[in-house]
Image (spheres, helix red, strand yellow):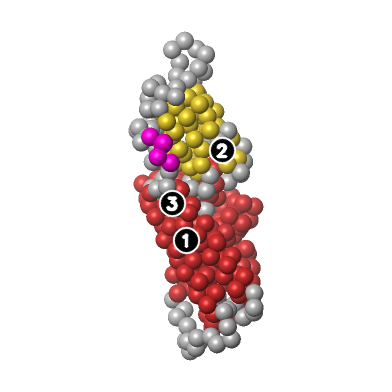
């Protein structure tokens, strides 16, 4: 639990509010945004869903984790939902005549939106999920995820307070523009993670072998060649590496900074960095890999 709290406070607050905070836009319109309790219900729903997910991860391991393609589809759906909230906020701030406020806003909406954030993991969330998986215990997994929610709660509470204030001022239009950009960015990350907008030069990836323990030195006779990629907070460095087509290669991922790039999706599967992934012989062309949230990409040029 202490590890989850630390991850939430140190690294998760900014990334999770950027990725998931757009769902709070659904509580920032009309009377919904004026009810302080709704933000609390949002956080309560988030705590319950994350705790249950942590228990499942600890009990069943990676068998219950979402594959990259499923996460990509959820990111696109969430981005479009946030964009819809933003458009509604922009329409409310367009003129003095606003739509009538509902007398009794549905309270179930806030906990459901909070619970839905578990389907939109940020890069740091994926690291905590890996911690829950490796614990092998439902209690430890639930504690890690609950601690993470507790660590990020102050940032979400502050965001909810800001949204409540903004929804009643002339800044609503600016907030709507920012939220619209964030929603489109989230949807774009999903498209990138799914590889649905990848360049035509990218060949279909051959099956990826399981990560091996250590790279093999290419200088040794008969050894498998290797390339090294560093995972940083700003992306993968170098962004493109060269390898020979038609022969296997070890891709050595080393971790420099904790963040989204700590989980890499290559060959349609998640790999936790640091790791070495052995690729079978590839055809000439570019092989693309991305971080666990689809925000940062790298390429291997086979020639």
What stretch of residues is rendered in magenta? 199-203
Residue 246, x across and y down, in percent? 38, 22
How far is disc 3 from disc 2 in space, using C-alphas? 19 Å
Closest to the observer, 25 or 300: 300
Quick check: is 73 in the magenta stretch?
no
Disc on the earlier residue, 1 or 2: 1
- Given the current orientation, which residue lies at the most extreme front position? 200
Dominant SS type (magenta): loop
Residue 106, x across and y down, in percent? 45, 80
Residue that appears at 50% across and 26% down = 242
Quadrant of the image occupied by residue 13: bottom right
Asked whether the viewer can see residue 79, the reply is yes
Residue position marked by numbered label 1 in the rendering: 79
Which of the two discs, 3 and 2, sits closer to the camera? 3
Mark 2 surroundings: few (<14), some (14-19) or many (≥20) residues within 10 A? many
Residue position marked by numbered label 2 in the rendering: 236
Label 3 close to label 2 by CB (< 8 Å): no
Q: In the displayed structure, would residue 195 be above or below residue 267?
A: below
Disc on the earlier residue, 3 or 1: 1
Residue position marked by numbered label 3 in the rendering: 191
Closest to the observer, 175 or 198: 198
How far is disc 3 from disc 1 in space, using C-alphas? 10 Å
Residue 79, x across and y down, in percent? 47, 61
Residue that appears at 38% across and 34% down = 203
């Amino acid at each position: 639990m202490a590890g989850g709290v630390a991850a939430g406070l140190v690294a998760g607050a900014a990334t999770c509010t950027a990725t998931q905070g757009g769902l709070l836009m659904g509580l920032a319109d009309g009377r919904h945004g004026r009810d302080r309790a709704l933000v609390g219900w949002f956080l309560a729903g988030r705590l319950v869903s994350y705790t249950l997910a942590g228990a499942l991860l600890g009990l069943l391991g990676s068998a219950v984790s979402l594959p990259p393609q499923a996460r990509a589809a959820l990111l696109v759906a969430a981005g479009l939902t946030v964009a819809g909230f933003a458009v509604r906020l922009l329409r409310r701030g367009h003129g003095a005549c606003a739509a009538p406020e509902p007398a009794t806003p549905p309270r179930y909406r806030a906990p459901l939106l909070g619970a839905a954030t578990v389907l939109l993991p940020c890069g740091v969330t994926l690291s905590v999920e890996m911690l829950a998986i490796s614990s092998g215990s439902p209690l430890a997994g639930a504690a890690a995820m609950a601690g993470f929610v507790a660590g990020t709660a102050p940032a979400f509470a502050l965001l909810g307070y800001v949204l409540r204030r903004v929804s009643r001022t002339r800044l609503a239009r600016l907030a709507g523009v920012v939220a619209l950009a964030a929603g489109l960015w989230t949807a774009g990350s999903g498209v990138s993670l799914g590889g649905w907008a990848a360049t035509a030069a990218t060949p279909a990836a051959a099956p990826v072998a399981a990560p091996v323990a250590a790279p093999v030195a290419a200088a040794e006779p008969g050894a498998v060649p290797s390339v090294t990629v560093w995972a940083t907070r700003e992306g993968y460095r170098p962004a493109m590496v060269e390898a020979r087509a038609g022969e296997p290669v070890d891709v050595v991922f080393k971790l420099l900074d904790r963040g989204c790039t700590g989980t890499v999706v290559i060959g349609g599967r998640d790999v936790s960095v640091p790791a070495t992934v052995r690729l079978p012989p590839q055809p000439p062309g570019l092989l693309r890999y991305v971080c666990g949230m689809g925000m940062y990409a790298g390429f291997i040029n086979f020639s």
